[in-house]
Image (spheres, helix red, strand yellow):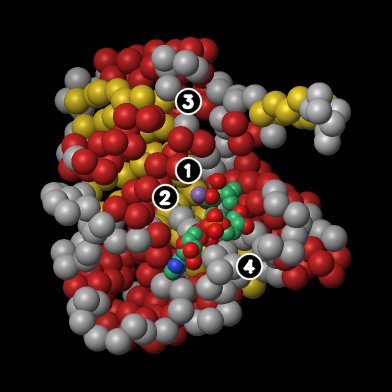
Amino acid sequence: AQPIRLAVIEGDGIGHEVVPEGLNVLRAALEGSGRTLEETPFDLGAGRWHRTGETLTDADMEQLAQHDAILLGAVGDPEVPSGVLERGLLLRLRFGFDHFVNLRPTRLSPGVDSPLADPGEVDFVVVREGTEGPYVGNGGAMRVGTDLEVATEVSLNTAVGVERLVRFAFDQARSRRRKLTLVHKHNVLVHAGGLWQRIVEKVAAEHPDVAVDYLHVDAATIFLVTDPSRFDVIVTDNLFGDILTDLAGAISGGIGLAASGNINPTGAFPSMFEPVHGSAPDIAGQGIADPTATVLSVAMLLDHLGLPAQAARVRTAVDADLAGRTSGAPRSTSQIGDALAAAVRSS
Ligand code: NAD
Ligand code: IPM
Ligand code: MN
């Protein structure tokens, strides 16, 4: 079998700490699978920007495109103006590789503490649009810094872009509990909200076996806290999905557990797997970041590469580790990574 060509972008902050542990577990999972791993590290992030002024060049994109998948830690640094790396690196990757599905599963594993007193069964997936919405940079500013300053960020929504995402979300629902919730704000954002609603109605008609409902995004935040078990598949736009998935992480054991995949389902470009969290400058360099979100992103990567048995071993190791966490002293990033890799090897 061909080696797996994996592009590795540690990025910034705790990205340098959690990605090595993700790789640690990935290597363990591939032992005995018949597949080997060819890792290409990419120097992208604050360090490179400070040295060269570059965020992500066309040449970088060409090299990245030669890979089967990308593993990314996080980007963003307090010493770099906000947005430079987030837009110039992370969003450029998502847009350039047409990662229109931003897949963010949430599951409260047995034994994991939730801040909710009575969370019930928490097992849903947010299918977040990844290439449109208010993220496209369709905005501008005038008279910056004056009392008459004007700033706009116009949300872009296309029928093609929404429909391809919604179809993916219905497929997810069919492979799960057959329930899909559209989350938007069509009572205010009538143009974009209307487009999303009409497309969901159209695709729903082709999927009579899937139960469909709708929540305004503000109400969705209520139910995520009061009754998260009502959710199976949430389909939503780029910005709402960003906000809902940090909340989803918080209710299911913390942002240190939340995994994601930026997926191009056509296979035209490499998909990219990364924890939902950011570079966490408040804890970076201390060796205390939880690598579990990255490890679970590696499980998604294994599924994506057609290695579901290996993905399942990683998830089983994580579940066992999580179940034992309430007791014992806090462990370092590498202690958790080593424990997970050892558990995968012995499974
Ligand atoms: P953040 O996710 O980095 O941190 C929020 C809080 O969660 C912090 O208290 C942090 O210590 C904690 N946290 C995050 N990951 C953790 C982990 N693995 N283990 C334990 N605790 C963890 O969000 P932020 O503070 O809003 O953003 C910091 C920087 O990261 C900014 O530059 C932002 O733009 C960037 N960011 C990048 C991504 C990404 O690369 N995908 C995602 C979010 C934020
Ligand atoms: C995330 C992050 C990014 C987003 C930022 C850093 C561009 O918050 O991956 O959730 O908003 O998508
Ligand atoms: Mn986010």
Q: Does the residue tagged 2 have its C-beta within 8 Å of any atom of ligand 3?
A: yes
Q: Position of residue 322 (x, y in %)?
A: 25, 72
Q: Position of residue 249 (x, y in %)?
A: 36, 54
Who's the residue at 67% across and 63% down the image?
77
Please name the amino acid that badge 4 sits on.
Asp
Please name the amino acid that badge 3 sits on.
Val
Give the image quarter of residue 196: top left
Circle 2 SS class: helix
Please name the amino acid that badge 2 sits on.
Asp
Q: Does the residue tagged 4 have its C-beta within 8 Å of any atom of ligand 1?
A: yes
Please say if the residues under marks 3 and 1 sit with CB atoms less than 8 Å apart: no
The quadrant of the picture occupied by the C terminus is bottom left
Q: Position of residue 177 (x, y in %)?
A: 17, 39
Q: Which residue is mark 1?
A: 242
Q: Look at the picture and state if 325 lies above or below 183.
A: below
Q: Does the residue tagged 1 have its C-beta within 8 Å of any atom of ligand 2?
A: yes
* Residue 174 seen: no
Q: Which residue is mark 4?
A: 12
**Between discs 2 and 3, the one toward the N terminus:** 3
The quadrant of the picture occupied by the N terminus is bottom left
Q: Which residue is mark 2?
A: 246
Who's the residue at 43% across and 54% down the image?
260
